[in-house]
Amino acid sequence: MKPPGPASVVEISSTAHPLRLFLRVLGPAYLVAVGYMDPGNWATDLAAGSSFGYQLLWVVAISSLMALLLQSLCCRLGIATGLDLAQACRRYLPEYWRIPLWLLAEGAIVACDLAELVGSAIALQLLFHLPLPWGVALTALDTLVLLSLQQFGIRRLEALVIALVLLVGACFAVELWLLQPQWGEVAAGFIPQAAHLSNSKQLYLAAGILGATVMPHNLYLHSSLVQSRHWSAHPKARPWALRYSSLDAALALGFAFLVNASILVVAGGSFHGRGLPPVTDLSEAYRLLTPLLGSGLASVLFGVALLAAGQSSTLTATMAGQVVMEGFLNLRLPDWQRRLLTRGLALIPALATVLLLGDQATNQLLVLSQVVLSLQLPFAVIPLVWFCGRRGLMGELQAPPWLLGLAWACAALIVLINGSLLLALARGH
């Protein structure tokens, strides 16, 4: 995204000290990373942990590595071409692909916003006893306040998001300290076990984890945000920009991975194997954490972290929506209009679910939204990998063969998991 005004650009001197360079580059990846720890992630990790213990931790790890690889390609595309992924699709793909890809990207953003809306509403209910329908309605306006910070510059917006991300991480650090899990069993959960996916429920949750971790709208957003750094003229400016931006992504997504793994570990250690039915509802998890961990602080931190995750990730979903609309259609709406459009489309299924099916259906809606994201992911990943392999487009920053090989392998794995899921659903599992 390239919003007008000098406050949207961070000037970087190529001759500055490496540490100062990195501190100036630091930021865009955290705006992306919040999408990897949104309430949709919470729902899938909670369902996976309470149902199967630590067995699916390896899916979280592999999904996080795939996310890092793909986000690094986004940095490469944005720095090499000066285009974000949506703009590149409009310019270099056949015309008949433009509208379908735009609609799929918008669908992913609405699915993501649906998860953030429901998650924030649940957090308000847990912390302040606000009825869920009222919380859902209130979240239609919440992010307008956060978006107003954009007028103070991209750095202040990044600082706010980093603070919210650190708050979520601190809450789960305390949760793990209260839980004291068996770390040997946790480590065993990171060993890949393809046999686990023979179970249709595990396959469904694995697809949900994939969709919650490798989010299609983040690919569009990161390729735009990386351009908020303007490097002074230097022969090595672009390679340096790529190197520092990739390091920024590695740190931010590494932190997001720790948060996601912590959610699954807390769920697995607290709820699995205790003679309880699987705890797949965020509200139920909030109520059970206090008696199981022996401290009321556990539940309060769970609610605070959920609210912080929902608020920070809904902000970046709005920014991604602006990037997608401007990139594919060359159309830019004021931020408040774009926010209300996205949130309005997400409000319909959220309110319908709460009013018709009750509060208990919200977690199933959260997991379903992440599976929808997974199904839409190939339509962003495949163009991204293809662009990064084109020498004429990327120049000296063309992805090397080993990186392209890994990227195409990721794309194939995503298609395979989604195809297996669709096949299982078609068979009625």
Image (cartoon, grey):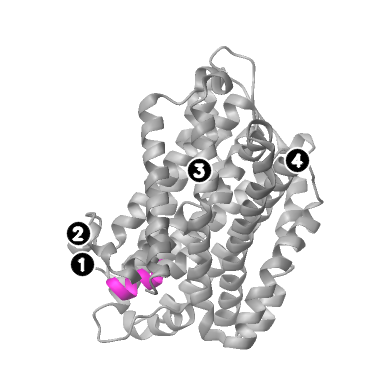
The residue where tag 2 is placed is 188
The residue where tag 3 is placed is 381
Determine which of the numbered discs, if any, sits on residue 182 in the image.
1
**First of labels 3, 4 by sequence position:** 4
**First of labels 2, 1 by sequence position:** 1
**First of labels 3, 1 by sequence position:** 1
Q: Is residue 188 left or right of residue 129?
A: left
Q: Which residues are magenta?
A: 45-52
Check disc 4 and give the amino acid type.
Answer: Pro
Across and down, in percent, residue 322 comes to: 72, 48
Q: CA distance from mark 3 to mark 2?
A: 30 Å
Name the residue nearer the viewer: 31 or 371. Answer: 371
Circle 2 SS class: helix
Viewer-nearest of labels 3 and 4? 3
Check disc 3 and give the amino acid type.
Answer: Val
**First of labels 1, 4 by sequence position:** 4
Name the residue nearer the viewer: 60 or 92. Answer: 92
Is 343 part of what is drawn in magenta? Answer: no
Q: Residues within 10 Å of mark 2 (few under 14, many from 20)?
A: few
Viewer-nearest of labels 2 and 1? 2
Across and down, in percent, residue 211 comes to: 47, 57
Residue at 47% across, 77% down: 282
Residue at 57% across, 67% down: 115
Quarter the C terminus occupies: bottom left
Circle 3 SS class: helix
Viewer-nearest of labels 3 and 2? 3
Q: CA distance from mark 3 to mark 1?
A: 37 Å
**First of labels 3, 2 by sequence position:** 2
Quarter the N terminus occupies: top right
* Corner quadrant of residue 57: bottom left
Residue at 34% across, 64% down: 203
